[in-house]
Amino acid sequence: MTRLSINVNKIALIRNARGTDFPNLTHFVEDLLKLGVQGITVHPRPDQRHIKYQDVYDLSDLIQRYPHVELNVEGYPDKDFLNLIKNVKPHQCTLVPDTPSQLTSDHGWHGNDFQFLQSVVKELRQFQTRLALFLEPNCNDVLWVKDLDIDAIEIYTEHYASQTGQKEKELAIQSILETSLAAKKYGLVVNAGHDLNLNNLGLLLEHCDIAEVSIGQAFTVECIYYGLNEVLKRYHEICLK
């Protein structure tokens, strides 16, 4: 079974667009939890254009009432982010190499980031949270990641999700599978995310044993088309196979 973690950044973005508290993010997340969602992902950025730092505190308080649910906080490990993790102590912290002006996550960490990450991981290890790194689907990256004191990786799946041809999809899945197997060889948990949706998630999970998938952009759009209950029903069915 794969844990389904819903990224609620886009819900926060809709709220922020009108400068009001509608939709109320905490109420929306609680509806998700009541419908069986097992994880919530947030990715606060320095400009707080969608998730605000206060949202992370509010959602952490809410999720503590749901023992089966995990909070995953993603982001670039600057001073503010590290302080946030220290205070909230989420179940999982996923480090992503975003720049402040970056529109969305579009690449993973590389070997030349090792020394920087080594110092960051050392600091985060004080905060009692599972640590994950956002990586490209490249098994060679696992060779340097294994020497960091981390627990998991999240494989960047955009390249797979963007393929339309069957052969291209198969090659993309093979890269994810090889990266996953290499990571598990060294005892790392394997998560995946970015541009996954109802149409491509099932094929990925048929071939790769993924502990957790994070879905946000597509989830929000799919809810507009099909409705919240129907979309979650479909995702639950895919993740339970």
Image (cartoon, rainbow, N blue to C red):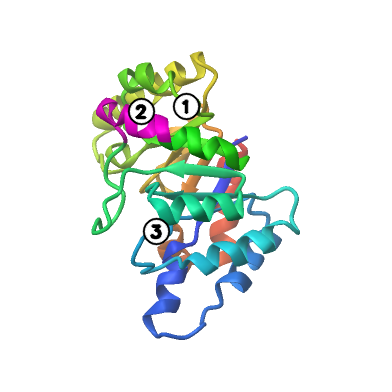
Q: Is residue 226 visible?
A: yes
Label placed on residue 158: none
Q: Main secondary structure of the magenta part?
A: helix
Label placed on residue 217: 3
Q: Is residue 177 on the magenta stretch?
A: no
Where is residue 232? Give x, y as percent. Answer: 58, 57
Over which residues does the magenta segment extend? Answer: 109-119
Res 28 quadrant in image: bottom right
Judged from this view, the residue extending furthest toward the top is: 185
The residue that label 1 is drawn on is 208
- Residue at position x 47%, y 39% in the image: 202
Count neighbours of disc 2 (C-alpha within 10 A) and say few if under 14, some if 14 to 19, many if 20 or more.
Answer: many
- Dots 1, 2 in contact, CB < 8 A: yes
- Residue at position x 75%, y 50% in the image: 67
The residue that label 2 is drawn on is 173
Where is residue 22? Give x, y as percent. Answer: 51, 82
Q: CA distance from mark 3 to mark 2?
A: 21 Å
Task: Report helix, strand or loop for mark 3.
Answer: helix
- Residue at position x 47%, y 49% in the image: 82
Mark 3 or 2, nearer chain start: 2
Dot 3 amino acid type: Gln
Q: CA distance from mark 1 to mark 2?
A: 8 Å
Q: CA distance from mark 3 to mark 1?
A: 22 Å
- Residue at position x 53%, y 50% in the image: 85
For the residues carrying marks 3 and 2, which lies nearer the camera in this image? 3
Mark 1 or 2, nearer chain start: 2
Task: Report helix, strand or loop for mark 1.
Answer: loop
Where is residue 57? Give x, y as percent. Answer: 59, 63
Q: Looking at the picture, does residue 233 appear above or below residue 28?
A: above
